[in-house]
Amino acid sequence: MLTVPFLRNILLAGGLVAVGLSPWSVYVVLRRIVFSGAAVAEVASAAVALAVLFQLAPFPIALLLTVASFLALSRLADSEVLPPETMVGMLYAGGAAASVLLIAKAPRGEADILNILFGNILTVPSSLLWTMAAVFGALSLLQYLAAKEFLISAYDPDMGRTLGLRVGLWNMIFYGSLGVAVAVAIRTVGALLTFTMLVAPGAAALCLTGRLSRAFKAALAFGVLCALAGVVLSYQFDLPTGPTIVALLVAVFALSFAFGRAAQAV
């Protein structure tokens, strides 16, 4: 496989998406915003439909609306009036409705919508790989440097305010960074794999350990191994690459959940 250029690109794309999203999945599970990825994926679909309708470049518009959607979520992250699920539900419903209405006016855009929903990891160009490496590298560095602020904002915002932490600002930084990561990932592998990678590795890791330092490492390992194994299996057995990786991630979560429950019973 490594002797074929486009297969190397697929392996690199899967690995980069796993490295870029798997650690964030721990925060997503801890913050109880699991379905935010699905909601924002609908917004990204609407953005592509809008771009197709007006003959614009889809990715910049999808990036803009994805980041804006996550920033809107940050406004409710610490709200005492409405839970974050409220905005997630509204984004999902609004994005789904908008994508259908817009694509109805742009009948030649179905292929672009399907490309966003299911991804096109088989044709990832080298230029996009460099972009992914730069974006995910910068976001990983931010996550490392701001780990304390992100965790306190997620776990105990009241304690954060007591310590002088600007919780609202750090929520905006967290959601904005997550929005950029999701937009780049959706552009590469589609909404289905992005959503699964944003949930399954962290959920599986937290089933196995209560220590956050280990959970982040386990989530990263699960994401990378499933991504690379999914590419290899899809090549060997002539299967769709994205769904194969998703199936492996779901299987890893199911096994981790069962093992965690068994360990608690003992």
Image: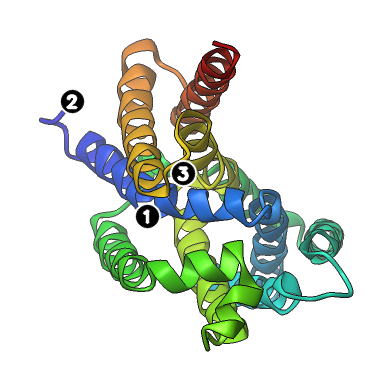
Residue carrying label 3: 120
Crowd band around label 2 with a 10 angstrom C-alpha radius: few (<14), some (14–19), many (20+): few
Q: Position of residue 82 (x, y in %)?
A: 87, 70
Can you tell which of label 2 and label 1 is closer to the viewer?
1
- Which amino acid does the dot numbered 1 rest on? Gly
Of marks 2 and 3, which one's residue comes earlier in the chain? Answer: 2
Q: Residue at x 84, y 75 (%)?
A: 80
- Which amino acid does the dot numbered 2 rest on? Met
Q: Nearer the viewer, residue 17 or 126?
A: 17
Of marks 2 and 1, which one's residue comes earlier in the chain? Answer: 2
Q: Position of residue 177 (x, y in %)?
A: 48, 71
Residue carrying label 2: 1
Residue carrying label 1: 20
Q: Residue at x 32, y 36 (%)?
A: 221
Q: Is residue 56 left or right of residue 9?
A: right
Q: Is residue 255 left or right of residue 192?
A: left
| Distance Cα–Cα, label 3 vs label 1 | 18 Å
Q: Nearer the viewer, residue 235 or 109?
A: 235
